Image (tube, helix red, strand yellow):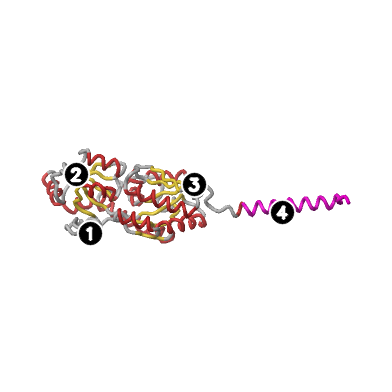
Amino acid sequence: MPTNPTRRRLLQATAGAGLLAAAGHGAAQAAFPTRPITLIVPFPAGGSTDRHFRLLAELAGKQLGQNVVVENRPGGGGTTGPGNMALNAKPDGYTIAQFPMGMLRVPHMQRTQWNPLTDFSFIIGISGYTFGLTVRTDSPYKSFKDYIEAARKQPGKIDYGSTGVGSSPHLHMEELAQNAGVTLNHVPYKGNADLTQALLGGHVMAQSDASGWDKYVDGGQMRLLVTFGEKRTKRWPSVPTATELGYGVVSTSPYGLVGPKGMEPAVIKTLHDAFKKAMDDPRHLELLAQLSQDLWYQSSEAYAQWVRVTYVKEKRFIEKLGLAAK
């Protein structure tokens, strides 16, 4: 029996509405992320930061169901990559970056287009560095005392390389030199890889950096003179700290992950949870032990609060060193 035209139109309308509702429900359920995420590492490939984030990205990607692709964007003492992200990336969670301590220091030293407090969404606090000063094994400086004594005899002639102006390896050496009453010559590099090659090639006398030098120290190409933690490292227990030697400098430079300002809370939570699980993975903990780094977990809220407090402290630190913008 033929269907009544009015009834047929009603059935078609009902079916169409059902399809639209189903489509809308599917769109609403399309959980973040649906494509790969870019993680900006603001230092060159091969250094300790790069090594750390490549493994962490791999582990977090498994939690997210999407690849987390590391993109190295060095420069500006670790500030160029995150700064450009804040200015140009969409706040959709698909572009995130490491947030090194330089982000809280460089704005006190020079004008920046980005504001470290208002132009970022804070995702999670992760870890901090073990810093040290290394020389080649054929260097005449057998101890840190030798190095400082040489600087005392030749003001401004004894140099060291760091990972950039305003980076922790730069500033804690400046603080130490100030406390020791000596003048050192600072030579900035883009990151660990080129700094390491400069030291091994004899272009710079010493390397101030995080523990990317570990394999060279263990392999006999470099000598570790001093570390900058609160206590000696487990991996190099014979090496004294700067505090032990009477210079009163402790530096660990905690860091975490950020995105552009305006990210949705649900997206931040998804990223936070994935990276938290990655941080607790045994492979990640093993890598941190190799790098002599500790976990420094901070929730999104706690990390944002830490940044606000630390930004004020760093202003006083930069002023003490005489490096504040005029």
The residue indicated by pointer 2 is: 136
Relative to 106, 146 lies left or right: left
Instruction: Check the image and report above or below for 128 versus 71.
Output: below
Instruction: Check the image and report above or below for 198 versus 256.
Output: above
- Judging depth in this view, the residue of 88 and 138 nearest the camera is 138
Q: Give the x, y percent position of residue 181.
A: 16, 51
Q: Are marks 1 and 4 in contact (CB under 8 Å)?
A: no
The residue indicated by pointer 3 is: 36
Which amino acid does the dot numbered 1 rest on? Answer: Arg
Q: Give the x, y percent position of residue 221.
A: 21, 45
Relative to 235, 60 lies left or right: right
Instruction: Check the image and report above or below for 150 versus 122.
Output: above
The residue indicated by pointer 4 is: 18
The residue indicated by pointer 1 is: 232
- For mark 3, give the secondary structure: loop
* Magenta part of the chain: 1-26
Q: Are marks 1 and 2 in contact (CB under 8 Å)?
A: no
